[in-house]
Structures are given as structure tokens and as C-alpha cells.
Amino acid sequence: MKFSRAVSAIILILFIISGTGCEENLNDFDLFTGNNAPVYFTKAPESIKKDESASLCFYCGKPVEGIKDHFLRPLAVVISNSPQSRPQSGLQDACLVYEFPVKGEITNLLAFYNHPFTGDIGPIWSGSDFLLNLAEGKGAVLCHAGHSNQAQDTDTTKITSLNLISHPDYSWRIRNRKAPYNLYSSTEKLLEGNKTLSLYQTNKLLGLFKFQTESKNTQPNLNRIDIIFNPNYKVTYLYNEITSDFVRLVNDKEHTDVNTNTAIIVKNLIIMSTNITDIEALDSIGDQLKGNGDGLLVNCGNIYRIRWDKKINTPTKFYWNNGREITLNPGNTWIHITSPQNKVIVN
Ligand SMILES: [Zn+2]
């Protein structure tokens, strides 16, 4: 009797985890392994206290000192993540970072800034139509080092990206790294460029995430999560119960930020399951990240199964399985776009 109950429970859990299925899904997670794989929550957490304060950054939920400290439009900076580029500068101060696969078995990063900080940002890398769409979907100005058709041209009033190759006044080359891994800038310089080039033509402040009042989780059920992008590149997050955030590792070594000289700390992790293997290749076939699929939200020591939905020129939305939008803990968020070849291991 006990055995049959257990079997029924397992079947029920598998049914819940597998979801209802949808033809539009880009890809659904189907493989999670680990010696001590935790329970995956499929429901929204109870008793969410939403903070309605208008003085919170809509990217990271942190209090900002008045509306003048918000950017009129956020900055979305393309940052290289090749071995020659690490450690980078400015990742810890980004409100939001996307990590996505590109050819050559590496990932690159798109860092969003919605308030100023003193410190370098870089190495800045080439943009693409895909990244332009990702930035514009959030009302942000893409800041990049050239190469893409749309993203390259800043001469017309319709373009909303800042090409630092054709407008070198708003960046600089550092001497202790070889080109092309030495292009750096700052929020101050990038804002100056956007203002001079009249890229602030539309106030497109778009709400992105909903934030909840953070509550400490006294019973975390997750210690670490590994995202294996390929045999030579693995990202690991180690949970810190005391501070309720994660330390980021690359290939088992701390991923540091030059500005802080410490390992990058992340509050919220999101993993999007897609069939994308090379984001730069998407541009050559005119494709974009759109559609919907499975995802994972990891914060406060728990892991949740969520869904994502992306339409052209709109922010990606994330939902609990009851259809409500997810809520995040105040702090920075890293969103990882994964392909079917990638593996996620939770312990
Ligand atoms: Zn912020």
C-alpha cells in the first residue's frame, strides 16, 4: 500500500514537472541531475509582500535616491566573456545581466545599468540585431563595439544604439590588455555619448520585474547550481545562507569583478531553456528570441519552475505556473539563456 502511494506520488510529481505541453515551446527542460537534487517548486511562494514604492529601481528593486538618479533610458552594455576578457569590470554593479551562448564555445554578457556608479565597464564587445532587440524591448540604449547592421548606425534619429567604434569619444582603451579586449567606458561617459548623439529621444521607462520584500529563508533546499555550457565552460553558483545570495564561479574559480576585486555576488538567478545555440548566428537568418519555454528561478535558497514568454520589442516576461508574474528579491539578477546542449545540475 505504501509502495503504491509512493509510486502515485512520483507519477504526480512527474506530471506536475512535465507541465501541460505546448507546440510553441522553444524547448523544455528535461534533464536535471545531482546527488541531492532538491524539490522543484512549481507554485508561487505564499504571502508575497509587494513593495509598491515608486523609488525602487525597476531592474534591481534597490532604493534609489530620487528620480534624478534613474537614467532616462537604461544602458545595456555588451561585455565580452572570453577567457582573455576575464575578469571584467562593472558586472557587480549591473542591475541585470544576460548571459548567452555565442560561437566558439563561449558566452557573452549584456549588462543593464539603470543608475550611475563610479567604476569602469568592459571589455565592451560587438553588438548585434538580437541584442538590439533585447535592449530595446526594455527601453534601453545598446552600447557596443560595432559590427551589426542595425546596431552599427547611430546617424539616423531612429537608431537607439551607441557604437563606440564609430564614436570613440565615449570610451577608452586600457593599456594592460591587447585589442580587441581592451575597450572600456563608464556610466558617466556612456550617458554623455547618449546625450550628445541625441539618443534620449523617448522616455521609455518600462517596468521589468516585480519585487517582493525580502524574507530570509531558514530552510534552503539548494546548495549549488552548475550550468554546463560546454565541456570547457561551466558556471557555478554557491548559495550563502547568511546573506541569501550566490557566489559566482567560472570553471570552479571565483569570477571576480576588477572594480571590487571580489567574487561576483548574485541575488536572483533565472535560467531560460531555448533551442538557441549561437545568438550571433540568429542575426544572419533574421531570427530573434521570441516564443516561450520553460525556465528556472533560483533565489533565497529555493528553486522554482517557471515559464518565460518573449515577444518582439517587449521585455521577456516570466510567470509562475498559475499565470502570475514572478516576483524577485531586491538585488541583482543574472538571466542565463541556455540551449539543448547545456546541462543544469542542482545540488
Ligand atoms: Zn538597479
Image (tube, rainbow, N blue to C red):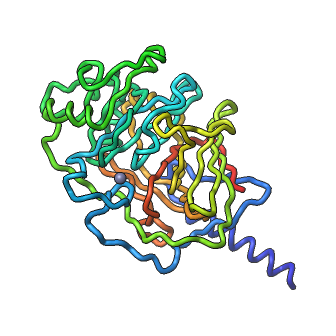
Give the x, y percent position of residue 10: 75, 71
The answer to which of 44 and 237 lies nearer the viewer is 237
Q: Seen from this angle, which residue lies furthest bottom?
A: 1
> Residue 278, can we see it?
no
Query: Is 294 left or right of 125, judged from the image as shown?
Result: right
Report which quarter residue 128 is drawn in: top left
Q: In which quadrant of the rendered image does the N terminus lie?
A: bottom right
Give the x, y percent position of residue 45: 52, 74
Give the x, y percent position of residue 331: 44, 57
Q: In which quadrant of the rendered image does the C terminus lie?
A: bottom right
Query: Is 206 left or right of 16, judged from the image as shown?
Result: left
Report which quarter residue 149 is drawn in: top left
Residue depicted at 44% across the width and 29% down the height? 280
Give the x, y percent position of residue 164: 29, 24
Residue depicted at 22% across the width and 24% down the height? 153
Query: Is 339 left or right of 13, judged from the image as shown?
Result: left
Please say if 147 is above or below 193: above
> Residue 227, can we see it?
yes
Please say if 27 is above or below 146: below
Residue depicted at 28% across the width and 43% down the height? 140
The answer to which of 174 and 229 lies nearer the viewer is 174
Report which quarter residue 120 is drawn in: top left
Residue depicted at 80% across the width and 77% down the height? 6
The answer to which of 8 and 113 lies nearer the viewer is 113
The answer to which of 32 and 99 lies nearer the viewer is 99
